[in-house]
Image (spheres, rainbow, N blue to C red):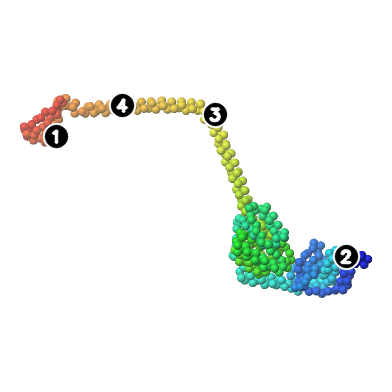
Amino acid sequence: MSITSTNALSVSELTFAIKNQLESQFPKLVIQGEISNCKHHSAGHLYFDLKDAAAKIPAVMFRGSQGGLARLPKEGDQVTVKASLSVYPPHGKYQLIVREMDFLGVGELLLKLEALKKKLHGLGWFDQGKKQPLPKFPRRIGVVTSPTGAVIRDILHVLRRRYAGFQLILNPVRVQGREAPGEIAAAIDAFNQHDLADVLIVGRGGGSLEDLWAFNEEIVASAIFRSHIPIISAVGHEGDVTIADFVADIRAPTPSAAAEIVSAEKAQHLLTLKKSGEAMRTALIHLLNRYREKLMGYARHPLFTSPYTLLGNAMQRVDELKGKLDHLITKQLGERRLQLEGKAQALVALDPKRVLKRGYAILFSRKSESVIVSHQQLSPKDEVKALLSDGEAYLTVNEK
């Protein structure tokens, strides 16, 4: 049996038939649920999902309907809305057109989040004193994230640009859904058990509160807290804050920022080395210029420009000094000779033998061989030796 187009509907006909049916059947609705994935369009319209534990439905609240709002809705708000059901033909999906909205209080997820924050804060898991410092030059960088998202590409891009010589180790996990918390915690534990990395980046890209919820689970917080490897939490965008951010050693606003933090120390040291090298080069050039100026000054010295003239002057000076030295020596020797001659003449004048030639004699006691200078030294019959100018004579004292 062949299919004929006689009674076939076009996509548009079917879509508008459904639209008419739904809009006529559900023109006025009052619905209660939790705000999720809320986005503020630049035109002023609000796009969000309204959800409960089992289902969710997209909704839009146009700017003209927002006049009665006490405030703009945010993630996790429990609200009651008055709306109509509509179909948006270009996308073929149904959505709520919200006309009024009342707030019922903090949503269930936010209540759970606040309760866990309070509990872990009381346990001291957020204390700054328990944070580990990052290594200065990590060689092995571990990453716990999805293997297919933009996160791993962004991290690699930053590291390749800023940090040569690293080894990146990815432990792929699901970052969203029921299984995600257990996989994330197990990946962190595996890195620690096998000592696979010097630092860990744990994170994912942006999303709604539900999308990021895996990083608000206690099992993930516990794995981060007991890790001996320093951990950087990089979950979502700058405005997203999770329990993992509070427990981690450092929070990065984005995964790219986490890669910059890992490479910051090395980049800073390289910059410092570059500046030091430039300063040393400048100082060396300055020093070389100083020595060059000194050498040029030496080159202009007469020793190099007129060495023979300089040596001739020096030799003439040496001759002058030699002449003066010879004269001084001759003078000194003459003076010393005259002094010696005077003293020699004095010694000759005092020579006892010269006195003996004039008829004198020197008497010695034969017994003691001492010179007799007084008659008191003599007694009768003493034998005396007389020293004369031409010899000796022996005498005997007869009387005194």
In the image, residue 280 above or below residue 266: above
Q: Amino acid at mark 2?
A: Val
Circle 3 residue:
305
- The local crowd at label 2, few if under 14, some if 14 to 19, many if 20 or more residues have their Cα within 10 Å, is few
Query: Spatial distance from mark 3 to mark 2, Cα to Cα?
Result: 105 Å
x 64%, y 58%: residue: 141
x 69%, y 64%: residue: 173
Circle 2 residue:
11
Q: Which mark is residue 337?
A: 4
- At mark 4, the secondary structure is helix
Give coordinates of residue 247: x percent, y percent: 64, 66
- At mark 1, the secondary structure is loop
Q: Earlier in the sequence, mark 3 or mark 4?
A: 3
x 78%, y 74%: residue: 32
Give coordinates of residue 341: x percent, y percent: 28, 26
Give coordinates of residue 304: x percent, y percent: 53, 30
Circle 1 residue:
369
Query: Spatial distance from mark 1 to mark 3, Cα to Cα?
Result: 83 Å
Q: Amino acid at mark 1?
A: Glu
Q: Nearer the viewer, mark 2 or mark 4?
A: 2
Q: Amino acid at mark 4?
A: Arg
